Image: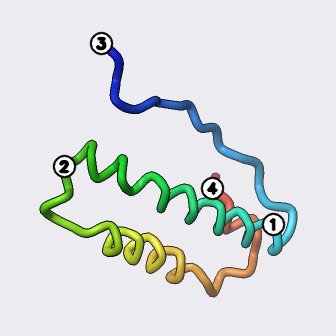
Amino acid sequence: MAAPFTLRKIGVPPNSANLTEARRRVFDFFRAACRSIPTIMDIYNLQDVVAPSQLRFAISAQIRNNAHVTDPKVTSPK
């Protein structure tokens, strides 16, 4: 029986070389996270609990919490 979604192995990327690259990667992460919201809502059956716009807002709020960080090594996952 096939799963309704495809699992992929996602490796940890290397640290960003500069702040511009780190910023681009944060935006790429935000886009990927927002695109996966419908799948996450289906997996966890969240349609009656939360709206997609609320999840997008929560993700963007977490990103904004770290907007003051200027060291590209800190913005990349370890």
Residue 42 vertical position relative to residue 63 in the rendered view, above or below? above
Q: Secondary structure at mark 4?
A: loop
Upstream in sequence: badge 2 or badge 1: 1
Residue type indicated by callout 2: Asn
Residue 59 vertical position relative to residue 45 in the rendered view, above or below? below
| Side (left or right) of 9 relative to 50 | right
Question: What is the number of the mark on residue 77?
Answer: 4
Upstream in sequence: badge 4 or badge 2: 2
| Side (left or right) of 28 relative to 39 | right
Residue drawn at point x = 46 percent, y = 30 percent:
7
Q: Quadrant of residue 24?
A: bottom right
Distance, label 2 to label 1, CA atoms, is: 35 Å
Q: Name the outermost residue toward the top.
A: 1
Q: To which residue does mark 2 refer? A: 45
Q: Nearer the viewer, residue 3 or 60?
A: 3
**Which quadrant, please, contains the N terminus?**
top left
Residue 11 vertical position relative to residue 32 in the rendered view, above or below? above
Mark 1 vs mark 4: in front: 1
Distance, label 1 to label 4, CA atoms, is: 14 Å
Question: What is the number of the mark on residue 21?
Answer: 1
| Side (left or right) of 4 relative to 14 | left
Q: Secondary structure at mark 2?
A: loop
Residue density around tag 3, few if under 14, some if 14–19, many if 20 or more, within 10 Å: few
Q: To which residue does mark 3 refer? A: 1
Q: Secondary structure at mark 3?
A: loop
Would you say the residues marked 4 and 2 are in contact, meaning their CB atoms lie under 8 Å apart? no
Upstream in sequence: badge 2 or badge 3: 3
Residue type indicated by callout 1: Glu
Distance, label 2 to label 3, CA atoms, is: 20 Å
Mark 3 vs mark 1: in front: 3
Q: Secondary structure at mark 1?
A: helix
